[in-house]
Image (cartoon, rainbow, N blue to C red):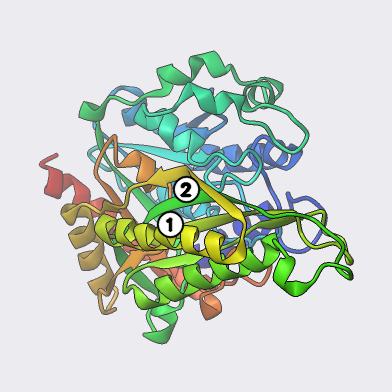
Amino acid sequence: MLGQLIFDRLEDAARHSQPGPGVTRLFLSDEHRAVTPLIRDWMTKAGLTSEIDAAGNIVGRDDKALSGAPTLILGSHQDTVVSGGKYDGMLGVALPIAVIEHLLKTGIELPFGIEVVAFGDEEGTRFQSTLVGSRALAGTFDPKALDATDDQDITVADALKAFGCNPDDIPTLKRDRKNVLGFVEVHIEQGPVLEKMDLPVGAVTALTGIERHRVRIQGKASHAGTTPMVDRHDALVAAADVIHQVEAICSATEGMVGVVGKIDVTPNAVNVIPDHVDLTIELRAPERTVRVNGRGQILSALPNIARNRRVEITADQTYEAEGVRCADWIMNGLGQAISEQGISPHRLFSGAGHDGLAMHDLCDIGMLFVRCRDGLSHHPDEAITPEDTGVAAAVLIDFLKMVGPMKGL
């Protein structure tokens, strides 16, 4: 019953999307504005007092949290990628709110405060800057991020102001670590492990480290019909070599994955040898040493490619987030709660980045993964079931009942 309620609410939230396949709801967009009253209504039904903070987060607190009691933060992000799914992020918003509503209706009182946060921006789709909301709570928000622009040259600062937020107040959002017990996020797995093991949920051990690089390959444009093959400085052929190296090195490195996810070719004409290519490289691994070693191999291959293809290649790192380990007490508590549902308490690491990467700078973190069909995410066909959603809710309820004794409250 609780699983179906959450599932239905996720369907309601998915209606707040740009036209097109799947769900597109970007940070500080009209769709973000439209979904906000819905989430706040859920919070009200759960007995939470809600507000929109200076970073565009939707925050709900119970009376204990408002009074300054030790507080456990729950939540996830409301934003999506372009043409994404209904459950990435929003599951971790709707589910804990419904769980708190269930505890309220059944008269179960927790000996600590609860705060539920629908982070405004985790995906970074609109402004190419991620974890804005969670970094604000953790006290690690970089004011330079306010100058980032979208494809309409609107800055984060201006978008926040248009949303009714005051970006100057973001530093005041930093939580007092002495009052925060931890941060727990429920999220779809975004991978195939749980489905292959026929398990509805699993406890997360660590969140992967991520880095991104921007690569410029400068060749020389010339006529595609009159320039002999041996005389070409073809930037796109060199780009193909770079892509091959990324694929080969990541395939040979256990625990690391990588992708060249974006490529722009200039002049991009049918009869002109490409003058220059801009591409991105993203590398992920839970262990920093693995990721750094892989990065070194890829970057060291670039000079040889440049020499062989007679082009110039430059690379700049644009983003890095270290992997973080989930707290043992949260992992153990979630594992015990999973066992109490008669399910094997499997543990797995996250190959995706999450708000926990930022919240780790504030407090202990943990995650509960929920099985998704075919491991598919960031896609319109992303799918979970009401039954698995109900299991995840039951696990969170049991876990919340354990937190007080585990923390001596």
**For the residues marked 2 and 1, what is the alpha-carbon distance in whole angstroms?**
34 Å
Res. 397 visible in picture: no
Task: Point out residue 233 in the picture as x, y percentages from the top left corner.
Answer: 69, 61
Q: Which quarter of the image is occupied by the C terminus? A: top left
Task: Tell which circle, 2 or 1, labels the residue nearer the N-terminal end.
Answer: 2
User: Mark number for residue 76?
Assistant: 2
Q: Which residue is mark 1?
A: 299
Q: Secondary structure at mark 2?
A: strand
Q: Quadrant of residue 201?
A: bottom left
The foreground one among 338 and 158 is: 158
- Determine the residue positioned at 66% across, 37% down: 37
Q: Secondary structure at mark 1?
A: helix
User: Mark number for residue 405?
Assistant: none
Vertical order, 372 against 332 (above or below)? below
As shown in the figure, which amino acid type bears the numbered disc 2?
Ser
Query: What is the count of numbered marks?
Result: 2
Q: Does residue 58 appear left or right of residue 66 in this picture?
A: right
As shown in the figure, which amino acid type bears the numbered disc 1?
Leu
Q: Are marks 2 and 1 in contact (CB under 8 Å)?
A: no
Task: Point out residue 276 in the picture as x, y percentages from the top left corner.
Answer: 71, 53
Number of residues whose C-alpha sits closer than 10 Å to that of mark 1, classed few (under 14), some (14–19) or many (20 or more): some
Task: Point out residue 254 in the picture as x, y percentages from the top left corner.
Answer: 31, 74
